[in-house]
Amino acid sequence: MTLNKKLFLVVALLSVINSIDAQTIPQQDLDSITLTSTRIDIPFKENSRTVNIITAADIKNSAAVNVADLLQQVAGVDIRRRGTGGSQADLFIRGGGFDQTLILIDGIKMDDAQTGHHTMNAALPIEVIERIEIIKGPAARVFGQNAFTGAINIVTKKKLNNTVSTNVEAGSFGQLNGNVTVGLEQDNATHIVHFGRVTSAGYRNNSDYDNSNYFLKSTFNKNKQPVEMIATFMERKFGAENFYTTNSTFNEYEETQNSLIAFTTTFRKNNFKIRPRVYWKRNQDVFLLRRFEPEFYRNFHISDKIGAEANASYNSKLGITGFGVDVSKIYLRSNNLGNRNRFMATVFLEHKFNLADNKLDITPGVAMTYFSDFDFNAFPGIDIGYSITDDLRIYGNVGYTYRIPTYTDLYYSDPVTLGNPDLEPEEAFAQELGIKYFSPKFSASVAVFNRDADNLIDYIRPNTTDGVFTATNIREVNTKGVEFDASYNFKIKEFNQTLAFGYSFLENDILDQNPELSRYSLNTLKHQYITRLSTQLFKNIRQNIVYKYAERTTGQTYNVWDASLVMRLKQMELTVTASNIFNADYIETGFVPMPPSNVLFGFRYNFR
């Protein structure tokens, strides 16, 4: 994976430009969805990558109460939770690391320079989500360096008309949740406001939490030149017992705050569209090794990202050209990591050629990024797709991907963890080949993938008697796998029923290492199987059952069953959500056992 190879592919792709999936959803929905996470507007059916779409209807039928639980139901996505209520969870795609997946909100990059442990802090409450777009495989060409193994774009609802919705939930472990969502339509503006709070006494010692979510989305001047504003504030306060250590004298505690404010507008003229945006993202993190003795050990970090971007597309006889620029400045203030700053600038360019009566599409592209502390890098790639019929499509893509170390990787220090300022960036060359079939009753997709990575970063100790894990560039690692998703839609009486299932298999050669010497890399999902049955037998009642099977490379296996029941009576909705019904004993990451069987009762009322 030399620089010469990269430059050759960049030049080749630029020469071409200058010279010339998921939980599947019903056919009628696919026709109406255009991916918003890309510069080129691409209908879901015409995309030449593995993209999963979770719609608002899927969320309703998921038996999930937050985004972390929801993403666990997608094959190829590995959510490793240390706590419940969305307090702390790490996000992995296709065996990558938690620093290697990018979260976006309406296309706004929510990467955190401190650590990927904060990725899921940006996840929104499900009440304001229109859909979730999950892009698997190297996405650096589209989004930049943090999309090493994939990206997840959370698309918020555009409007809720004039409505007020209230929801109250109570259940096991002292869970008490409540939220209010308001939609307001004015002559020249639209507003969505959400406030929610989720609390629990915890299912084990020091596992309590008190989490709050605030969300505001407004569109101003909508009759002339609409300007969209989005503002979020997510606060998490939780006991973190054994989240990172097993020391019996510790009583860990953590508080995080994640906020965003952004302004976006879109200009259109003839075949040209440009979408400029400015944004400010902040994350604040306080961690205590002893909850009631902050003077013993306390980490305090504040990271700010201030950015501006403009994405554009142009339609011509030769196809669609997408291009854009993204500049941002990172500031970090930390008692552990020091005071740091970084400037980043990325230029994107891609072009979609439609050939053979629009059955064949070829989309080469490149992202070129400058980092003030890691110099210039380029991520070339190409997507190719061919529609055999209106319902059957084959596709493939290849590309380079890249990730610079986080500030935690470089500078962190505590009694068991040590950063390394001499780390090199992670690099990979990835390939994928897939086939998709869509019809109103049955949809399915299969994808095989391969990733050759250099300089992957893990926390390693030299032997089992050494208690300190040091950030290290480990040797070359090959990762390969296969994913399968299918969905069958049918009717019983006049009611719609859905049976969906997904399977992923992943294999890498990292197991030549001693698993006891690694902190993160050796706990990937080798086999993952998920089934969801959503049924309706009576007019106002719908029930959902979700089965999840996992086998990790460390040898651990577990089976988890979840279920939900929803009863709708005009403007009122009653819900029962049961998690881990058969009381499986399992750990997703680290040393934290997941909750035993539990139940949550909910009541929602819509005022119109």
Image (tube, rainbow, N blue to C red):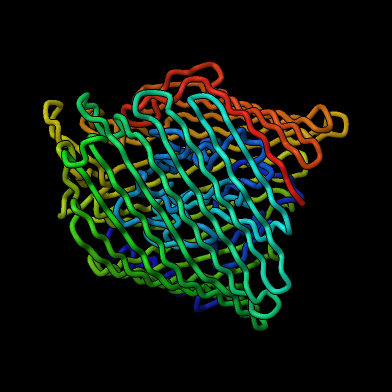
Determine if residue 521 is in view.
yes
Dividing the image into 4 quarters, which one contains the N terminus? Answer: bottom left
Residue pictured at 50% horizontal, 17% vertical: 583
Residue pictured at 73% horizontal, 72% vertical: 187
Q: Residue furthest bottom?
A: 269
Residue pictured at 21% horizontal, 41% vertical: 294
Q: Position of residue 275 (x, y in %)?
A: 55, 74
The answer to which image quadrant residue 581 occupies is: top right
Q: Position of residue 211 (x, y in %)?
A: 45, 42
In this rendering, the count of numbered labels is 0
Q: Position of residue 147 (x, y in %)?
A: 41, 55
The answer to which image quadrant residue 59 occupies is: top right
Q: Position of residue 27 (x, y in %)?
A: 74, 48
Q: Is residue 110 above or below residue 344?
A: above
Q: Residue furthest right?
A: 493
Q: Residue furthest top?
A: 582
Q: Is residue 457 above or below residue 567?
A: below
Determine if residue 321 is in view.
no
Q: Is residue 527 above or below residue 482?
A: above
The answer to which image quadrant residue 491 occupies is: top right
Nearer the observer, 368 or 579: 579
Left or right of 406 on screen, residue 434: right
Nearer the observer, 324 or 212: 212
Q: Is residue 355 above or below residue 472?
A: below
